[in-house]
Image (cartoon, rainbow, N blue to C red):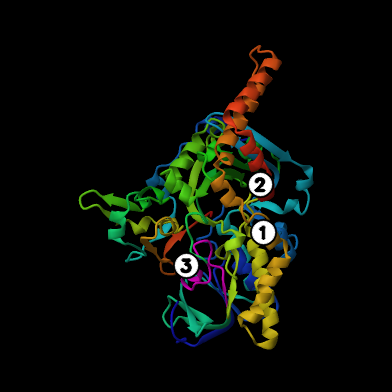
Amino acid sequence: MGIDIKRYLEPHKSPTMSERLDMVKRRFADTSHIEVDQEAFRADAERAVLFLCPAQVFKLNEQDQTCIVNYEDCLECGTCQVGRRYTKWRNPRGGYGVTYHYG
Amino acid sequence: MSDGTASGGERFEVVVVGAGPAGSAAALTLARAGVEVLVLERGDYPGAKNLFGGILYTSVLNELLPEFWAGAPIERHIINRRWATLDDDSQVALDLKSAHFDVPPFNNTFTALRAKFDRWFAEQAEEAGAMVIPETNVEGLLTQGNRITGVRTGREDGDVEADCVILAEGANALLAEAAGLRPLMDGTNRVSAVKEVIALPAEIIDDRFHLEGDQGAGIEYFGGAVDGMVGSAFIYTNRDSLSVGVGCLIDDLIRTRTAPYELLDRFKAHPMVAPLLRGGETVEYATKMIPEDSYSSLSDLYADGVMLVGDCAGLVNPSIHHEGTNLAMASGVMAAEAVIEARKSGDFSATKLRLYREKLEESWVMKDLKRYRDTVHFLLDNREFVDDYPKLTVKLIRRYFTIDDTPKDEVLTELWRTIRSEVSFLKAARQMWRARKTML
């Protein structure tokens, strides 16, 4: 077969989030395409965006309990705005953001 | 919605927003009829921002481009489908493998990768005469009174006027929602899905999934695979990679405080799944929403000078069939046909564009969506079907086939006892009756 079979008997290694994000080609815009209503975020007991976002774009600032938005990591699914309506999401400018190689 | 009229002066008969299967099918159909059509795509190229689990349903595609499989960048045709339910460490599956699916048109079921396929499909529309401009985001709709008269792009002097705008912007339906053309996206009508493309040599995939040549397999997992949430996990074989992912209703992810990528990690590590992935290297991680709008809550899908097609219209079969790309292409074609008819009178008002909805209603698209209109709500109201029942099924079948010198009479008695203690008969009977009507 010409293939090193042993190599394909090793367990699959699941990538970390930063490895996952590094796999995706992204062109960063200067400004964020995601806004968070910080007061609504603070008032939300669940703070769902912190775990719901598939790219971990949202992080909690422990000091002032605000939401940090790493918009450069966004993979543009839109889940955050649907999950909780205090994130306002726009498309990144044309030609910016994610370019999938496989899709 | 942007207010006012256009500045910049570009004008096309039709502007299509988004170069996915729905948008390109509309553009191809329009271009062939000699309609001046412009497709605006916000990605670097058509397909750059497009994603699905991995199965392309191709009945409509084969009508548009007969025997497309000879030239299109598709991966494999699916001859093996498996629907599996998991508990913590076991699997029970229904497995369908058929030589019927190994000959044209291959059961209209292929695996594909969208960055490649969508690019090719948009090129077919271009060759037919459509103009496709990438790297262009549509920020708003131009209006005159209630009528949509064009689009405002992010480019300088970027307004484009049109007799008709076809919104094919995908599941994250920002324009359609902002313009009040569809109900709000919410946690009960949107699934959030994550997927990895995991590279493996074609020979390893052939061997591991019992395939040869261009044959492919599609496995869907329920129950314990997604922690009893409304959703599913999947493995699809591409030529030399696997598409592996999970998708769950957003409200369920919030309710259970589950991160989608953690769910994916758990699924990949399941003892019945991990051996299929051995030696595979993840080469891409991606995410998208999937619409599961119920037929009952769909908007009209048309208004003066505008139509909604594909995911943005909510045209995905939410049942076990999970078809989307074929509904998208069918809607694109029907919207185009409505334009071609409206063009004869030069009237693109809602009265004329209603033809689009009528065509959808007469076709399998709306017949299917109508049939499964209550599927999602049924599952939300009868969680046993996604949680307890799948797990119980695995448990019962495992016990039935467990060899430990228990006389089979006693095994059966024990199984009945288990069922009686875990299932309320009257309730289950009622549920099964309703399930037959909403899910089958």
Q: Residues within 10 Å of mark 1 (few under 14, many from 20)?
A: some
In the image, is A43 to the left or to the right of A85?
A: left
Secondary structure beneath label 3: helix
Q: Is residue B368 magenta?
A: no
Dots 1 and 2 on the same chain: yes
Does B281 sit above or below residue B139?
A: above
User: Circles 3 and 1: CB distance less than 8 Å?
Assistant: no
Say which residue appears at 57% left-offset and 51% top-offset: B376
The residue carrying mark 3 is B174
Q: Which mark is residue B434?
A: 2
The residue carrying mark 1 is B370
Secondary structure beneath label 2: helix
Task: Give the amino acid at mark 1.
Answer: Lys
The N terminus of chain B appears in which quarter of the rendering? bottom left
Task: Give the amino acid at mark 3.
Answer: Leu
Residue farthest to the left, as pictured: A63
Chain part drawn in magenta = B165-182
Judging depth in this view, the residue of B313 and B96 nearest the camera is B313
User: Circles 3 and 2: CB distance less than 8 Å?
Assistant: no
Comparing marks 3 and 1, which lies closer to the viewer?
Answer: 1
Q: Chain of mark 2?
A: B
Q: Is residue B122 visible?
A: no
Dots 3 and 2 on the same chain: yes
Picture coordinates of residue B273 (x, y %)? Answer: 56, 34
How far apart in space, not on screen, are marks 3 and 2 (Cα)? 35 Å
Does B417 sit above or below residue B230?
A: above
Which quarter of the figure has residue B363?
A: bottom right
Q: Is residue B177 magenta?
A: yes
Does B56 sit above or below residue B201?
A: below
Picture coordinates of residue B165 (x, y %)? Answer: 56, 77
